[in-house]
Image (spheres, helix red, strand yellow):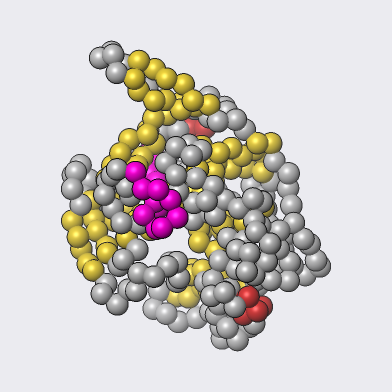
C-alpha cells in the first residue's frame, strides 16, 4: 500500500464578456477547466467509447446502444437488447472483469469464473500464454472490478474495484490495483488494508467507500498536466478521482485529488475523447440519488481558456 499526498479542489468564478457567470474549476497544480453538457435526459448511461472518426457510442442500463455522430446534437439509437433485465448492477486480446455475484468464496475458486479477470482471444478461444492455457482466467481474487485500462507507456494494467457492501464485510475497501498474470488479489481472504503472503495488496484503498465505476488514462493534448494520469468516476464518492503517477515508475503514486466533488452527484464512466477533452457520465437515475432536471447526462471537461 502506498501513501499519497491528497490535493485540494478549488472553485473560482469568472465573469464572461456578456455579464453571465461562468463556473471555472482548478486542480491543485493549476489546471483550469470548465464543464460542458453533451447529452441530457439519458437513463443510467453505463459505458462510453469513441471510434476513429470521433463518433461517440454509449450504452444505457435498460439495454440500449446509441451513437452520437461527431458534431451532431442528437444521438441515434442503434440497438435495443430486449433480453436485458433492468434490475441492478450485474454483469487484440479481450479482457473481462467479473464480480463474485455476492458469493464471495467463488473469487478464490479456480473452477469458477466469478471474481476474476478473464483473458480470451477475439474469437473466444483461450490464449496459449494465459497462466493456465486451458483456462480463460488471467488473475483471481476480485470482488467487483469495474474499470480497466493500461498505462500508455509502461503497459501496466490498472483496475478499479468495489470493496464490501456490509453484508459481505465492513464497508469501504474500494481499490485501485495493478493487475498482472497469475496473481491473486486477495478477496475475500484479505481486503481493505490487510496483507498476507501470496496475495497482492492494492495500490490504493478507499475507506469510506467511493464506489469506483470506471478507470482510464489520459492520453490527450488538451491538458498536458493530465498526461498519463489515471482517472475514475466515484458513484458514492460523487467525484472524479485523479491519480498522478511517478513518470519514472508508475507503480508509485505521487498524488491524488477529487475533482467536481458533489457537483454532479454520482459519476460513473470517465474517459478522454479524441478531441483531448475528458468525458464523463452521471448515474443519478439508478435509485441512489436525487435526479436533477435533465439527468442523466454525458458531460465533458474542457480547458477554461
Depicted 196 relative to depicted 130: above or below = above
Residue 38 position within the rendered picture, expressed as x and y whole percent measured from the top left: 28, 42
Task: Give the farthest residue toward the right.
Answer: 197
Left or right of 93, for residue 189: right
Depicted 106 relative to depicted 201: above or below = below
Left or right of 130, for residue 81: left
Residue 272 position within the rendered picture, expressed as x and y whole percent measured from the top left: 41, 45
Depicted 257 relative to depicted 205: above or below = above
Residue 229, can we see it? no
Assess whether residue 291 is covered by the magenta stretch: yes
Q: Nearer the viewer, residue 189 or 243?
A: 189
Left or right of 247, for residue 23: left
Assess whether residue 74 is covered by the magenta stretch: no
Residue at image coords 39%, 78%: 123
Residue 291, can we see it? yes
Read off the magenta span.
277-292
Residue at image coords 35%, 63%: 61
Residue 140 lies in quadrant: bottom right
Q: Nearer the viewer, residue 36 or 286?
A: 286
Left or right of 171, for residue 97: left
Residue at image coords 56%, 86%: 134
Q: Nearer the viewer, residue 238 or 195?
A: 238
Q: Quadrant of the C terminus?
A: top left
Depicted 41 relative to depicted 134: above or below = above
Residue 75 position within the rendered picture, expressed as x and y whole percent measured from the top left: 20, 52
Amino acid at each position: 500500500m502506498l501513501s499519497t499526498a491528497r490535493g485540494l479542489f478549488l472553485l473560482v468564478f469568472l465573469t464572461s464578456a456578456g455579464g453571465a457567470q461562468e463556473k471555472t474549476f482548478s486542480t491543485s497544480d493549476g489546471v483550469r477547466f470548465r464543464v460542458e453538457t453533451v447529452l441530457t435526459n439519458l437513463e443510467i448511461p453505463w459505458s462510453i467509447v469513441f471510434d476513429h472518426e470521433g463518433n461517440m457510442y454509449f450504452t444505457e442500463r435498460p439495454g440500449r446502444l446509441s451513437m452520437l455522430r461527431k458534431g451532431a446534437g442528437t444521438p441515434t439509437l442503434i440497438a435495443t437488447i430486449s433480453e436485458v433485465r433492468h434490475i441492478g448492477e450485474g454483469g487484440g486480446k479481450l479482457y473481462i472483469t467479473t464480480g463474485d455475484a455476492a458469493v464471495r468464496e467463488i473469487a478464490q475458486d479456480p473452477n469458477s469464473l466469478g471474481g476474476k479477470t478473464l483473458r480470451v482471444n477475439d474469437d473466444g478461444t483461450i490464449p496459449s500464454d494465459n497462466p493456465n492455457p486451458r483456462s480463460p482466467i488471467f488473475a483471481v481474487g476480485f470482488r467487483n472490478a469495474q474499470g480497466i485500462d493500461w498505462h500508455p507507456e509502461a503497459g501496466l494494467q490498472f483496475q478499479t474495484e468495489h470493496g464490501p457492501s456490509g453484508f459481505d464485510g465492513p464497508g469501504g475497501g474500494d481499490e485501485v490495483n495493478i493487475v498482472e498474470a497469475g496473481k491473486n488479489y486477495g478477496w475475500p481472504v484479505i481486503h481493505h488494508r490487510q496483507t498476507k503472503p501470496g496475495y497482492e495488496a492494492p495500490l490504493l484503498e478507499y475507506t469510506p467507500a467511493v464506489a469506483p465505476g470506471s478507470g482510464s488514462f489520459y492520453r490527450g493534448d488538451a491538458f498536458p498536466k493530465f498526461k498519463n494520469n489515471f482517472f475514475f468516476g466515484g458513484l458514492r464518492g460523487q467525484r472524479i478521482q485523479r491519480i498522478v503517477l511517478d513518470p519514472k515508475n508508475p507503480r508509485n503514486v505521487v498524488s491524488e485529488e477529487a475533482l467536481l466533488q458533489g457537483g454532479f452527484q454520482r459519476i460513473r464512466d470517465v474517459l478522454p475523447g479524441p478531441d483531448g477533452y475528458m468525458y464523463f457520465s452521471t448515474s443519478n437515475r439508478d435509485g441512489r440519488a436525487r435526479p436533477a432536471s435533465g439527468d442523466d447526462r454525458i458531460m465533458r471537461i474542457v480547458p477554461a481558456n
